[in-house]
Image (tube, helix red, strand yellow):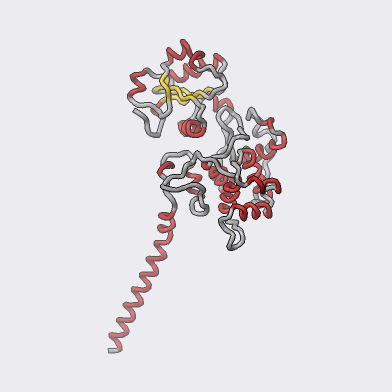
Amino acid sequence: MDQQEDVTMLRKTAVVLLAVILIVCCVPQAAVLAAPEFSDLQSHWARPYIEALAEKVDFPGAGGGLFRPKDKVTFGQFVALLLQSLDEEPEPGSAGSPDAYMELALEKAIIEQGDMSGAGAVITRLEAVRVCAMTLQNLLLEEPEENATAAARDLKDFNSCKACRENISQLYAKGIVTGRPGYIFDGDTGLTKAEACAMIARMIDPSMRATPPPPDEANVLISPESVKYIMETDENAILVDVRTQEEFETGHIPGAVCVPVGDLIESGAEMFPDKDAIIIVYCQRGSRSQQAYEFLRGLGYVYVYNMGGIADWPYELEP
């Protein structure tokens, strides 16, 4: 009888141990499943950065399965995202309050006293760069400064804010922030949610940083990923398919307009009167787009990019 009780006890112990092992083994999987899935991020350029922050932050304005990457971010929301990503939280009982995060940021010396009244305003790219630069200096002390005085000189509006040049140079040289198409920084523009996540993720994880390409290379060829980013973030950019109308109708990149290369050469200046506009050209394999690129550059268009052939486009096409 005693022997039977011992066997029963051993079986119960084995069941309990098995249950504990299963729970422990399933924890990582549960954590992964808990990460949010947003239907508007399936092929978005910022998805890796957003996923890198997903387990730590509360994304503002996300709901209904949508992230809304183009939405602008307020100063208070950006500060909260940044502090949450660094595991810095306000005192218990005040977590979640924008004012609490702003006060903590002021205490940590990553914002200035004058920023306190602007928590609800959209944060600009310049302001976000300043906050990130102060974070690198006062919180991430192990991050060395770059000898970056000339790093961002290719940005055409680099000198528009002399007080901001050092901050821009530091973050630009480190690959935390990149310029906008056409080699401008566009500092007065409001920061989008996608850009905010990319900036924070790159600052925290150096492996996610991207050093900007040299100007000559950028003006010759542009990657499909960069084209997708431009079309999602700049509503004034022009994407031109220089194939024939028949080829265009078999499938084209979303947002493109069809202007066969012959028509472009015949009346391109009339079609695109703004020579400072961002114009991206592509064809089937790259030869006609190169011809269009050289023609537009010869007319004096400054911000022209050649993507090459549609065969290199890895995303969905429109019929």
Q: Position of residue 149 (x, y in %)?
A: 70, 35
Q: Quadrant of residue 217?
A: top right
Q: Position of residue 307 (x, y in %)?
A: 46, 26
Query: In the image shown, does 157 or 193 lie closer to the viewer?
Result: 193
Observer able to see residue 29: yes
Would you place residue 277 above or below residue 201 in this image? above
Query: In the image shown, does 46 or 13 lie closer to the viewer?
Result: 46
Q: How many numbered discs, if any?
A: 0
Q: State which quarter of the image contains the C terminus.
A: top left
Q: Position of residue 169 (x, y in %)?
A: 66, 37
Would you place residue 160 above or below residue 79 in this image? above
Q: Quadrant of residue 121?
A: top right
Q: Position of residue 240 (x, y in %)?
A: 45, 22
Observer able to see residue 144: no
The residue at the far bottom in this view is 1
The residue at the far right in this view is 163
Going 59% across and 33% down the picture, which residue do you hit?
A: 179
Q: Is residue 174 left or right of residue 38?
A: right
Q: Is residue 310 left or right of residue 81?
A: left
Would you place residue 25 above or below residue 154 in this image? below
Q: Quadrant of residue 5?
A: bottom left
